[in-house]
Image (cartoon, helix red, strand yellow):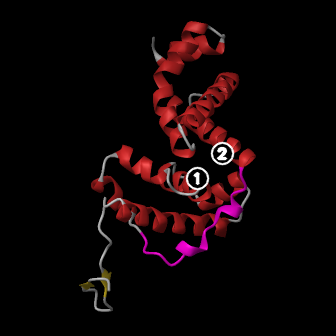
Amino acid sequence: MTEEQMLAGSIKNNAAAQEALYNRFSPRMLGVCYRFAKNREDAEDMLQDGFIKVFTQLHQYRNEGALEGWIRRIVVHTCINILKKNKKFADSVDITHANSIHIKEDMIPSIMQAKQVVECIRLLPLGYRTVLNLYAIEGYSHKEIANMLEIEESTSRSQYTRAKAMLEDVLVKKKIIQKPRAKTSFGAAISPL
C-alpha cells in the first residue's frame, strides 16, 4: 500500500489502511518515544497515545513536508505532554554538573552505536534528557523548548549544557570515551591532574 493510499484510507477510518500506516511508522516513532521514556513500557504507552492523536488529526495533514516528519512532531509533542503531566522540568536542574567538562556533539556518533548513545542518554535526569533530546536530536530551538516545557529559555540552555556535561561523565564512567585532555592557553593538550 502506498503512502497516499494509507493516508486516504486512514482518514476514512479504514482499519487496514490505519494498520499499514501504524506498521510503517511505529518502529521509528517507538525509538523517539524510547528516548523520552523511563522504560519500554512507558515508551509504548507514549507511542499509543501519539498514534491516537495522529489518527484523530490526520485530516489536518496538508502534504507539506514528509508524512513521517508530521507524525514525528505529533509523537514528540505527545511525549512532552505526558512528561509535563508527571514532572516539573524546572525542578530537575542539578547544579553539581554545572562546571563539568562539555562534550562535543560531533563526537557521539563516531564513538559508539546509536543504541549505546540512547542508553546513556536515558541515564540522565528527566529534565536534562528531555532538553537534550529536543535540542540535539529533534532540532528544536531553546525558545521552542521553553514554550513546550513551560520553562525559561535560559533554563533550557542551562539544562542542555549540563546534560552534555553529565552525558560525558556517563560515557567516561562506562569507559566508552576517555576524559578529554585539558588544553593550555597555547592550545596544546595536557593531561588532567
Q: Are marks 1 and 2 in contact (CB under 8 Å)?
A: yes
Near-viewer residue (182 or 60):
182
User: Which amino acid type corresponds to the residue marked 1 in the rendered image?
Assistant: Thr
Q: Quadrant of the C terminus?
A: bottom left
Q: Is residue 141 above or below residue 46?
A: below
User: Which amino acid type corresponds to the residue marked 2 in the rendered image?
Assistant: Ile
Secondary structure under the numbered disc 1 in the rendered image: helix
Q: Quadrant of the N terminus?
A: top left
Tell me the magenta residue range: 87-102
Residue tagged 2: 80
**Residue at the image point whose x is 37% and y is 48% from the top:** 116
Query: Which quadrant holds residue 171?
Result: bottom left
Please indicate whether residue 112 sits to the left or right of residue 143 in the image: left
Q: Which mark is residue 130?
A: 1
Dot 1, how many residues are within 10 Å of its Cα: few (below 14), some (14-19), or many (20+)? many
**Disc nearer the start of the sequence (1/2):** 2
Q: Is residue 64 visible?
A: no
Q: Position of residue 132 (x, y in %)?
A: 52, 56
Dot 2, how many residues are within 10 Å of its Cα: few (below 14), some (14-19), or many (20+)? many
**Residue at the image point whose x is 42% and y is 61% from the top:** 170
Alpha carbon distance from label 1 to label 2: 8 Å
